[in-house]
């Protein structure tokens, strides 16, 4: 039974609790959940521990408990409160976000209060797992939305320019059509969550080639990327929205020629990418509204990129925007050059 109180034992209990939380958050019927049951059994000093899903199927560790009495106890627990049967079997229903998620079963001479505390621990772990899964689904949905967010205005202008060149400059028209096909393939095709920075730079090069064809001499472009960062893994479609924003909201509204600078370089263990334009700029307060996703105005792509960066790397790795009205805009992306679990 759970009766030890020495400091060393307390540290062990806390460590086991943390591992149980980690192992069970993926669900009750996974190999890691079986590992969590073994930890629960040791933590409580029980003869056996098990989970039952909503269909009544049970998963055990320790001395197997599979008779009809156990099945009846599980059915009862799925419809009622904590059930205690055979004097040595305790069944506690697990509530996950106000819904029944299954049953915790513990067999042996174990304190019912201790079993209920472990049940609360399991409930919190399952709830956390559901929240993380929901967040991942939202991130994937945002990525799909971003992939489909090719500006109709840009598509129309690019195809119009290509059509105008078909007779007068057929070679140039063919080159731009290949650029357009390459750009749409990368933007719309299914991708992994991450890609190499070299792929992102290739995508924005084709995008900028098409924009130069549309805007002519009004748009100048400078791209400089250090070879040592080309293999850095970054979230897919993290650069194109920044370049598109620089052109649509920086260069196009201004008169005369404008320039977009795109740079990528290593700074210690980080990779720093910047997209800078000498366009009309904006009020810094409006830039904060954009990053918060409250500005609309076709700039939701920036908020999307900022949110994805913070989700992957942590809150200190979001976008940094330097701007002022009439002074252009510079957007800075800083990502680790090597990040565990991040690979194309």
Image (tube, rainbow, N blue to C red):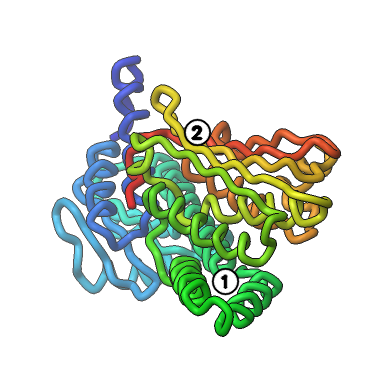
Residue 82 appears anywhere in the view? no
Tell me what residue is drawn at x 49 percent, y 67 percent: 183
Among the two numbered marks 1 and 2 on one chain, the one whose residue lies closer to the N terminus: 1
Residue 46 % position (x, y)? 24, 43
Is 113 left or right of 35, judged from the image as shown? right
Calculate the distance from the C-alpha at mark 1 to the C-alpha at mark 2.
27 Å
Q: Of helix, strand and loop, which one carries label 1?
A: loop
Residue 272 % position (x, y)? 50, 33
- Toward the top, the furthest residue is 7
| Image position of 67 with respect to 194: above or below | below
Please tell me how crowded label 1 is: few (under 14), some (14-19), or many (20+) other residues with Cα within 10 Å. Answer: few
Residue 31 % position (x, y)? 22, 56
Tell me what residue is drawn at x 69 percent, y 57 percent: 300
Is 165 left or right of 322, judged from the image as shown? left
Q: Of helix, strand and loop, which one carries label 2?
A: strand
From the image, tell me which residue sits under label 1.
148
From the image, tell me which residue sits under label 2.
272
């Amino acid at each position: 039974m759970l009766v030890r109180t020495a400091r060393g034992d307390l540290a062990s209990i806390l460590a086991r609790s943390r591992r149980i939380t980690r192992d069970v958050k993926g669900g009750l019927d996974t190999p890691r959940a079986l590992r969590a049951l073994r930890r629960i059994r040791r933590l409580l000093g029980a003869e056996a521990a098990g989970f039952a899903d909503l269909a009544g199927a049970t998963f055990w560790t320790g001395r197997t408990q599979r008779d009809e009495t156990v099945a009846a106890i599980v059915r009862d627990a799925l419809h009622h409160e904590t059930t205690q049967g055979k004097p040595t079997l305790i069944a506690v229903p697990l509530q996950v976000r106000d819904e029944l998620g299954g049953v915790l079963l513990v067999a042996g001479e174990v304190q019912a209060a201790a079993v209920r505390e472990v049940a609360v621990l399991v409930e919190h772990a399952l709830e956390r797992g559901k929240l993380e899964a929901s967040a991942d689904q939202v991130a994937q949905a945002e990525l799909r939305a971003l992939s489909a967010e090719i500006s109709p205005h840009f598509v129309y202008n690019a195809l119009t320019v290509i059509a105008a060149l078909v007779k007068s400059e057929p070679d140039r028209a063919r080159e731009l059509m290949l650029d357009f096909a390459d750009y749409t393939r990368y933007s719309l095709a299914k991708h992994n969550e991450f890609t190499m920075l070299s792929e992102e730079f290739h995508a924005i090069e084709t995008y900028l080639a098409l924009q130069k064809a549309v805007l002519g001499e009004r748009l100048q472009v400078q791209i400089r990327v250090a070879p040592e960062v080309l293999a850095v893994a970054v979230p897919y479609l993290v650069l194109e929205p920044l370049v598109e924003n620089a052109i649509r909201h920086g260069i196009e509204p201004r008169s005369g020629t404008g320039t977009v600078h795109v740079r990528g370089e290593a700074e210690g263990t980080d990779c720093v990418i910047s997209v800078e334009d000498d366009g009309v700029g904006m009020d810094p307060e409006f830039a904060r509204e954009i990053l918060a996703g409250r500005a609309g105005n076709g700039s939701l792509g920036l908020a999307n990129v900022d949110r994805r960066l913070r989700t992957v790397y942590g809150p200190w790795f979001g976008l940094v925007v330097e701007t002022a009205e009439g002074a252009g805009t510079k957007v800075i992306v800083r990502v680790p050059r090597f990040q565990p679990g991040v690979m194309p």
